[in-house]
Amino acid sequence: MSDFAQTVKQQADIVKVIESYIRLRKAGAQNYSGLCPFHKEKSPSFSVHATRQFYHCFGCGVSGDVFSFVGKIENVSFPEAVRIVAQKCGIPLPKREYSSPEQAAEARLRGKLLDLHEAATVWFEEQLNGPEGSVAREYLAGRGLTPEGIKKFRIGYAPGSFNALRDRLSILADADTLRASGLFSQKEHEDGTLGPLYDRFRKRITFPIANESGRVIAFTARTIETGDKAGPKYLNSPETPLYSKSLVLFNLDKAKTAIRQLEFALLVEGQMDCISLYLRGIQNVIATSGTAFTEQQVAILKRHTSNVAVNFDPDAAGANAAEKSIALLTEEGFAIKIITLDDGLDPDRYIRERGVEAYTAAVRAARRKSDYLIERARQMFPGQSAEQKVKAMNYLLPHIRREPEKLSRDQFAADAAQKLGIDSAVLREELRQAALKRRDHIETRPSALTEIDRVLLRALAITDPEHEDARRAAAEAVNSQPQLFERLDAFAALQQLANRGSADPMDVVTDETQRALLAEALLGETEPPSENTVTGAIQSVRKRLIENEIRQMRAQISEAERRGDFTELAALTQKKLDLDRSLRHLHTHSPAH
């Protein structure tokens, strides 16, 4: 070990260095413990000895000193690890030595690119405060940003000039370095040659993107113009030697301390959402910057917390992004909650219009991930038919499969069955087996017709006037109370037959699956059902519906008892008594077959 490395090691506090990456808790006079960043675990087995200045994981067996920790977690060489630890401890660096010319050239390029991005940030800030930045300042003020907030996030403005930033930075670097920075563009001519460099960001508000150390490495720039010539609403830096969007979480440099203190991260979709929340005191907030959440970002976040509250925009794109984020976070063992804001507002607008207290209340009221996904399944596949329920379950099963613990998979599946109103024992067992075996979908087989399906299909297919009373009784029930029959597999066919007029029954039912059910019912018919038989079938459907409502009511009563909500408990108990009374009435007045 070099003399400089030895000096750094003597001065470095391994606990403080490691705490800049993961959460540690005191676990004795000289020991600290936390979740190991080098393997997946739920119970802390990673220990740091403050006096002897070493770490060891009892789970995966890794151990070492402050340099090996930083080298392993940052994936850098020993000299680079020494440099990082020295910077964290405020120790001046000696003149750098490199193992190869290529390594030296790469390090010089990164250093120059960091300098260029710092200079660009300063210049953009100057432009925002100058005459050309007036419209941008007005826009930012309209979004609720104060001068202090703008300064905190180093927001700037890129004027309309094609070469102003290029001219400013050309004194700091040559054309190849400027090109590598991602701050400039150039057009390719028909003959394959490249035109001159010109400023990538023009007539846009600039939002710097920093790495975990707080150094600016890229920009997002928002247009303040409208119309076809304005270009995309947001323009981002391209991939560069400094910046890979899949490896960066916006605002993590500012938020990581609060994330560790509060023991959870608040994940939002947009940078303005993130900035707006942070400046109003919600400081454990990070953003994906409008890109899909990646495995690398999840791994970076895992260093700081294993609890996440997700608050993406409520539109379709936001809901899809939330789903993908939930999937990745679940696979990495995160505890996840979903925040839903009233009136479809995004976080930025909500906190500006409703205030910090209202937003904090929404965070406290965040739903379990499973509840959010089940509700989404109900919205995507509405209705009570078996077909819709199978679709809803097949939407949920990949999420259930990702649950790492068998008990949580079983609970998720049970909640889904109850809330989706799956009263079929066969379908419930299919779901349970799929969850236990971590399958992605339920095998859909042609369902066997129940006797109720057969009676109603045959009645509605009657063409003989002699049995018209039975047909009319079935048609009136289906048309006047369709909610009674939604759970029947043949519901779609029943609706079409009830309104067929004089048309041939097989011609009216257009869906192949439903027509197959009708054919099965009619092929097994010996004689048309009587009006009394039809009335009995309708009564059976009513009984089924009430019995299902009673089951759901029991679950709600149990939940109210658990919460100690006696007002709700009294109301639910009365409803259940009414349902019990209705069921007894149906049993008493069932028609004789």
Image (tube, rainbow, N blue to C red):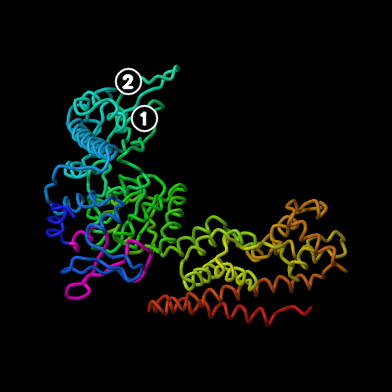
Q: Is residue 17 magenta?
A: yes
Q: Give the label on residue 387, or none.
A: none
Which residue carries the number 1 mark? 226
Pinpoint residue 393: horizontal percent, then vertical percent.
57, 62
Q: Quadrant of residue 229?
A: top left
Pinpoint residue 96: horizontal percent, then vertical percent.
18, 42
Assess disc 1: are there few (<14), some (14-19) or many (≥20) residues with their C-alpha within 10 Å of its C-alpha: few
Asked whether residue 240 appears in the rendered view, the answer is yes
Instruction: Look at the picture and state if 508 lies above or below 216.
Output: below
Which residue carries the number 2 mark? 196
Assess disc 2: are there few (<14), some (14-19) or many (≥20) residues with their C-alpha within 10 Å of its C-alpha: few
Viewer-proximal residue, 257 or 83?
A: 83
Identify the magenta region: 14-43
Viewer-proximal residue, 143 or 392?
A: 392
Pinpoint residue 301: horizontal percent, then vertical percent.
33, 56
Pinpoint residue 461: horizontal percent, then vertical percent.
81, 60
